[in-house]
Image (cartoon, grey):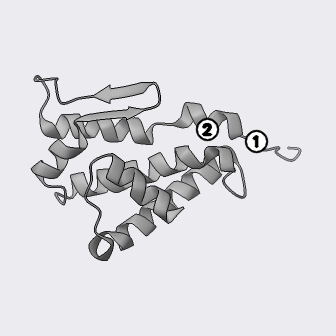
């Protein structure tokens, strides 16, 4: 799944450097996995939820880089241009009222905020008698 995450980051316009980015990516992947497993009350991520997992990992990774100042302005402009996936297209570069930081933050939020899609995998957690 590591390769799929790196491919997704590259598709988003981020230049991934395995030497400097691997540690952070692994941490964020574990964080995303823990979130999904906890939110859905599962023991493992279903294959059908893997694309959502990949997007959440990418969102966490890019947000960490952005908030810590490790994402250059040229890197941000590469990321927030135009993203097309199937019939869905996201374009932030043409919105002149937003700063590059705001555009990147919106894109990152769209990658992370995927609870609606995860609801399909959620299992009910039964509580014991009170």
SS label for mark 1: loop
* Relative to 69, 45 lies left or right: right
Q: In which quarter of the image is residue 96?
A: top left
> Is residue 109 shown above or below 19?
above
Q: How crowded is mark 1: few (under 14 residues within 10 Å), some or many (20 or more)?
A: few
- Label number found at residue 123: 1
**Above or below: residue 66 compared with residue 81:** below
Q: Pick the residue in front: 46 or 68.
A: 46
Task: Please identify the quadrant where the C terminus is shown.
Answer: top right
Q: Report x, y in % for residue 128.
A: 86, 47
User: Splitting the image into 4 quarters, where does residue 40 fall?
Assistant: top right
Name the residue rendered at 18%, 30% in the picture.
93
Which residue occupies 17% across, 51% down?
Answer: 75
Residue 90 image position (x, y, % from top left):
33, 28
Say whether residue 9 is left or right of residue 97: right
Crowding at mark 2 (Cα within 10 Å: few <14, some 14-19, many 20+): some
Residue 118's label in the rendered image is 2
């Amino acid at each position: 799944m590591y390769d799929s995450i790196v491919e997704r980051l590259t598709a988003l316009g981020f230049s991934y450097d395995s030497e400097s980015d691997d540690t952070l990516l692994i941490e964020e992947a574990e964080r995303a996995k823990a979130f999904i497993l906890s939110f859905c009350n599962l023991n493992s991520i279903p294959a059908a939820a893997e694309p959502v997992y990949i997007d959440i990992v990418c969102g966490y990774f890019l947000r960490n880089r952005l908030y810590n100042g490790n994402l250059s302005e040229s890197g941000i402009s590469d990321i927030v241009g135009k993203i097309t996936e199937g019939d869905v297209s996201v374009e932030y570069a043409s919105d002149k009222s937003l700063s590059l930081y705001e555009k990147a933050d919106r894109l990152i939020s769209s990658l992370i905020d995927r609870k609606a899609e995860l609801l399909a995998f959620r299992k009910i957690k039964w509580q014991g008698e009170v």
